[in-house]
Image (cartoon, rainbow, N blue to C red):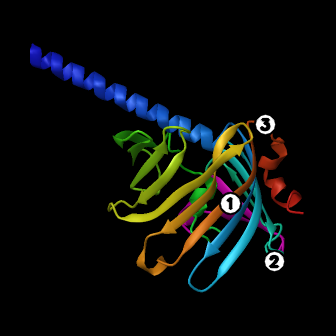
């Protein structure tokens, strides 16, 4: 009888910890994305051979809808991207053509950076598509392991996230493949007030493979507004060409 009681108590504690950890992840996702978000940001791609700088604007609603426009450099100006649910398109003004990006290309590099099409599309939700487990913590951070749910179509075998207790925002995220090999790390720095919240304004993506050991992609968030109404016209296929100019 006592053993049964202890087992029930242990299960209840495990359920409570899982629920609390999921609440942390929900706060992280809400703080990063908001109900809606408008941003202006700079992306710098560095390799051993070259450095490339781009500037962009983005409009988004949660994980479901996003629209991005390249504003610099001149040769890429006007390229647009649209994501609705799990579908993604790109418009290239030089050839006046809209291209649908297939799911098979979700892990391909986005605009030559160390980010992928999946990152841009936010195809997977860290809240909905992963099980969450608190594996460590200290006075300032939580360390949370995210393992994909059985029915989730996600690209990562495991994600480990270091979350700030002060801001409920990520400090570092580690992405692993299905063989538990670390593929890349993403570090978030320079937290400052943007709109109604603290936000990491300097993101550094570092691929871990040997052939990309000198690569990195930096994202600098220049401006951001959250939870304000966005014109629904941005989230239509017509927007790709219309807002390209």
Image-based side of 221 in relation to 162, left or right = right
Residue for point 47% across, 54% down: 173
Q: Residue at x 61, y 39 (%)?
A: 31
Please give the name of the residue rendered at 40% of the width and 40% of the height, measured from the top-left corner. Answer: 132
| Quadrant of the frame with the N terminus | top left
- Tell me if mark 2 has few (under 14), some (14-19) or many (20+) residues whose alpha carbon lies within 10 angstroms of its own: few
User: For the residues marked 1 and 3, what is the alpha-carbon distance in whole angstroms?
Assistant: 21 Å
- Image side of residue 229 versus residue 18, left or right: right
Secondary structure of the residue carrying numbered label 3:
loop
Give the class, few, some or many, for how many residues have Cα within 10 Å of label 1's Cα (few <14, many ≥20): some
Say whether residue 24 is magenta. Answer: no
- Asked if residue 83 is positioned above or below residue 127 in the image, the reply reads below
| Mark drawn on residue 75 | 2
- Residue tagged by mark 3? 228
Q: Residue at the location (68% across, 60% down)? A: 220
Q: Which numbered disc, 1 or 3, marks the residue that appears first in the sequence?
A: 1
| Closest to the observer, 103 or 81 | 81
In this view of the protein, can residue 10 be seen by the observer? yes
Magenta residues span 87-109
Outermost residue toward the bottom in this view: 49
Label tally: 3
Classify residue 128 as left or right of residue 231: left
User: Tag 2, which secondary structure?
Assistant: loop
Residue at image mark 1 = 220
Q: Position of residue 207 (x, y in %)?
A: 48, 69
């Amino acid at each position: 009888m006592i053993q049964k009681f202890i087992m029930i108590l242990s299960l209840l504690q495990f359920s409570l910890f899982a629920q609390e950890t999921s609440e942390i992840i929900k706060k992280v996702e809400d703080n990063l994305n908001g109900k809606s978000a408008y941003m202006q940001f700079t992306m710098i791609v560095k390799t051993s051979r070259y450095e490339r700088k781009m500037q962009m604007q983005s409009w988004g609603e949660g994980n479901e809808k996003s629209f991005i426009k390249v504003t610099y450099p001149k040769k890429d100006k006007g390229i647009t991207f649209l994501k609705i649910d799990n579908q993604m398109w790109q418009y290239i003004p030089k050839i006046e053509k809209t291209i649908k990006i297939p799911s098979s290309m979700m892990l391909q590099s986005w605009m030559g950076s160390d980010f992928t099409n999946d990152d841009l599309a936010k195809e997977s939700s860290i809240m909905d598509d992963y099980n969450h487990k608190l594996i460590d913590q200290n006075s300032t951070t939580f360390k949370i392991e995210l393992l994909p749910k059985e029915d989730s179509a996600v690209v990562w075998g495991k994600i480990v996230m270091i979350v700030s207790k002060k801001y409920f925002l990520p400090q570092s995220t580690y992405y692993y493949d299905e063989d538990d090999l670390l593929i890349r790390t993403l570090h978030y720095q320079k937290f400052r007030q943007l709109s109604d919240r603290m936000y990491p304004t300097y993101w550094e993506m570092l691929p871990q493979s040997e052939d990309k050991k000198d690569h990195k992609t930096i994202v600098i968030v220049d401006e951001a507004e959250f939870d304000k109404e966005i014109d629904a016209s941005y989230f239509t296929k017509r927007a790709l060409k219309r807002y390209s100019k």
